[in-house]
Image: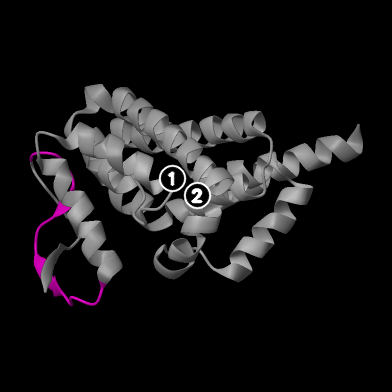
Amino acid sequence: MTLAADAEFCKHCGAKVGKHRRVPWWHVHRRLYDWTLAWAYRPSAAVALFCLSFAESSFFPVPPDVLLMPLALGNPRRWCRYALLCTIASVLGALFGYLIGWGAWQVVGPFFFRYVPGFTHEAFEQVGRLYDKWNFWVVFTAGFTPIPFKLITVSGGVFKIHLLPFLIASITSRASRFFLVAGLMRIFGPKITPFVDRYFNWLALLFTAMLIGGFVAIKYLM
C-alpha cells in the first residue's frame, strides 16, 4: 500500500496534503497520481514538470496539471514560466506522439492498445471518423479537455492528418489550458484549488462546446 493525501494544503507550497489514507496497491492510477504529486516537493520539480508534460502527450496517464498547480501555488511569481514550460513540453510530446503513429504504429500499436489507458480499438476508429469531419477541432478539444490527448496525437500520425493544423491546434489548446490553470492559482491561491480540482473537467468541456458552437454558428450565419 501507499499513502494518499486528503484535501488539506501544505503550508510551504499550497499543494493538497494533510491527513493520509492508505491506497491499495491495485489502484495503479491513484498511485501514479501520488507519485507525480510528490515531485512538487523536490528541487527538480521544474524538470519533472517538463518530462511529465512531454510524456502525457504520448503515453503517460497522469495530466501535468497535477504538478503544475502546486508549483504555481508555491511560487506565484513563476506561474507564467511554469505554464510556458508545460506548454512547450506538451507540444513537443504531441509531435513525438504524432511521429509514433506516423512511423512506428505497426510495431508499437499492440503495446498501446494493451497497456496505455485510453487506447481501445473502438476509440481509435471513432477518432478516425472524427478526423474526417473536424480535423483541427479534434486536436484542440482533446488538448484543452480531459479527453486523452495521447490518443489524439498518436492517431493523428496514424491517419496522417496535416501536420501544420495539428501543431497549431496543439499549441493553442495546451497553452490555453495550462495558462488558465496556472493563472487561477496565481490570482486566487489555495482557496480555488479544490474547485479547480473538482470541476475543471466539466468547465473545460463547457468552454470547448461554447467555442466550437460559436464557430459553427458563424459558419452558418455568414
Identity of the residue drawn at 43% across and 45% down: 57
Task: Specify the principal SS of the magenta part.
Answer: loop
Q: Which residues fall within the magenta stretch?
A: 12-27
Q: Residue 157 falls in which quadrant of the image?
A: top right
| Horizontal and vertical percent position of residue 135 | 71, 43
Residue under numbered circle 1:
57
* Circle 2 Cα neighbour tier, 10 Å, few/some/many (<14 / 14–19 / ≥20): many
Viewer-side residue, 129 vs 160: 160
> With 197 as the anchor, is 22 left or right in this view?
left
Q: Closer to the N terminus: mark 2 or mark 1?
A: 1
Please provide percent x and percent y for residue 209. 65, 49
Q: Quadrant of residue 139?
A: top right
Q: Left or right of 79: which side holds 129?
A: right
Q: Residue at x 58, y 44 (%)?
A: 102
Q: What is the quadrant of the N terminus in the image?
A: bottom left
- Which secondary structure, mark 1? loop
Q: Is residue 189 visible?
A: no
| C-alpha span from label 2 to label 1 | 6 Å
Q: Residues within 10 Å of mark 1 (few under 14, many from 20)?
A: many
Q: Magenta includes 152? A: no
Rendering quarter of residue 74: top left
Q: Are marks 2 and 1 in contact (CB under 8 Å)?
A: yes
